[in-house]
Amino acid sequence: MPTSSNDHLEYTSHDLAQTQALGQLLGALLRPGDVVCLSGDLGAGKTAFAQGIGRGWGARERVTSPTFTLVHEHRRDADPAVFYHVDCYRLDGAGDAWSIGLEDLWHDDGFAVIEWPERIQAALPAERLWIAFAFLGAQQRHLALQASGARYVALLAALGEQLGVTG
Ligand SMILES: Nc1ncnc2c1ncn2[C@@H]1O[C@H](COP(=O)(O)OP(=O)(O)O)[C@@H](O)[C@H]1O
Ligand SMILES: [Mg+2]
């Protein structure tokens, strides 16, 4: 059972499908301007979660890992919004993020879902949803969702409502 408070939600996933399903619920709630950070070790489930986001948001194509390309740009039929899926694994500090203008991704029609955000910590906005993924077992993952800022507290509340938890 997930547990939550105003700005925090904890979730245990028992398999890949559950991680994707949680991502899917969140994806349906995301909108331009949003920043969602996915932190955790290799294989923890960040890309799996982003695949769910793409599904829930309505991305035209399947979401795959942007490790080698840095950013994947996804669109949907409903509106001009753009889902930027970023992987900062190959970036070396906030300076790299600034020099490529990463912050432009979450302006106008865009929102960003960022893997390896710890690589570019200082380039991230103070207000964001931070999701920390941790291994519990071969198929089990612990997800700790931390909201910073009113938009993300509301987002987390909406997600908690979908999961049937009350904050
Ligand atoms: N509960 C789970 N949630 C997410 N992935 C899981 C889970 N259990 C097993 N896995 C496996 O772990 C791997 C996660 O890979 P991926 O999402 O690419 O991780 P990351 O992007 O964090 O490096 C996949 O091979 C997936 O099948
Ligand atoms: Mg990944």
Image (cartoon, rainbow, N blue to C red):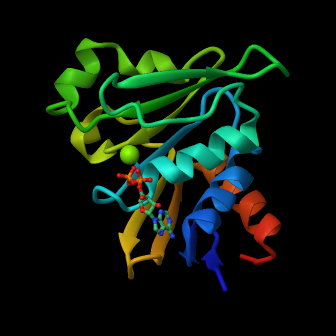
Residue 84 versus residue 104: which sits nearer the camera?
84
**Which residue is rendered at x = 64% and y = 49% of the image?**
52
The answer to whether 164 appears left or right of 87 in the picture is: right
**Which residue is rendered at x = 27% and y = 24% of the image?**
97
Residue 122 versus residue 118: which sits nearer the camera?
118
**Against 45, is 60 above or below?**
above
**Which residue is rendered at x = 34% and y = 58% of the image?**
43
Q: Quadrant of residue 56?
A: top right
Number of marks present in the image shown? 0
Where residue 153 appears, as percent x and y from the top left, is: 64, 56
Where residue 127 appears, as percent x and y from the top left, is: 50, 43
The quadrant in which the C terminus is found is bottom right
The quadrant in which the N terminus is found is bottom right
**Against 58, is 164 above or below?**
below
**Which residue is rendered at x = 27% and y = 47% of the image?**
118
Q: Residue furthest right?
A: 78
Q: Residue furthest bottom?
A: 1
Residue 87 versus residue 149: which sits nearer the camera?
87
**Against 162, is 116 above or below?**
above
Where residue 165 appears, as percent x and y from the top left, is: 76, 78
Where residue 70 appears, as percent x and y from the top left, is: 34, 25
